[in-house]
Image (tube, rainbow, N blue to C red):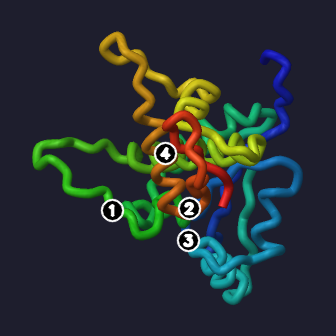
Amino acid sequence: MTGKVASYYVYALKDPRANPVLPFYIGKGTGNRAWEHTINVDSTAKGERIKDIMAAGHEVVTTKLADGLTEEQALKLEAELISAFGTEATGGFLTNAVTPSGKGQGRLRADLKVPSGVYEKAVIGLDLLKDAIVELAKANTDGVTNADCSKALGLQSNYGGGAKDYLSYSILGLLLEEGRLKRNDRISKGRHVSVLK
């Protein structure tokens, strides 16, 4: 490993009422993160499952699946496991909320084969890209442009010999739509500048 601290782990929360005991949530974390879910129970599908388990007189089984990982390794393993088990929203059994609320997959080509788990991987990846752009905007209070995002985050494509920034442009559009960023009223040299909302 090149200077990265390997302090992350990937964990599973399991329901002891089933046999075999299967995971209902996969996550990554450091320190006590895996056990915090049962201390501070939220109102998500994961939280509701935890409440049901506790109300039935059981304890959630918390298991570290891999330890001593870099954050990048933990993210990749977490995404792979979520896509392998699937979420309840896509016919699997994990309560992980990786699907954006109110967003459908749209109309797909009739002959398009979609492997199980690829949608979850894409959503997890998109969430990470969104977070990176918001963090970039936080660090630059005057705002960021599409070109700033694509160049700083390595999202620029060389498709057809020309630099295209469509991916970062699409992500900025989603962040504007979600209200996490807003357009700055000023336009710098004809370019739109996005800032924190």
Residue lying furthest right:
31
Residue 171 shows which numbered tag? 4
Q: Which residue is mark 1?
A: 104
Percent x, y of residue 45: 57, 75
The image quarter in which residue 17 lies: bottom right
Q: Which residue is mark 2?
A: 96
Q: Residue at x 72, y 44 (%)?
A: 142
**CA–CA distance between discs 4 and 1?**
16 Å
Label 2, residues with CA under 10 Å away: few <14, some 14-19, many ≥20: some
Label 4, residues with CA under 10 Å away: few <14, some 14-19, many ≥20: some
Q: Which residue is mark 3?
A: 18
Quadrant occupied by the C terminus: bottom right
Residue lying furthest bottom:
55
**CA–CA distance between discs 4 and 3?**
40 Å
Q: Nearer the viewer, residue 37 or 2?
A: 2
Q: Residue at x 52, y 43 (%)?
A: 192
Mark 1: which amino acid?
A: Gly
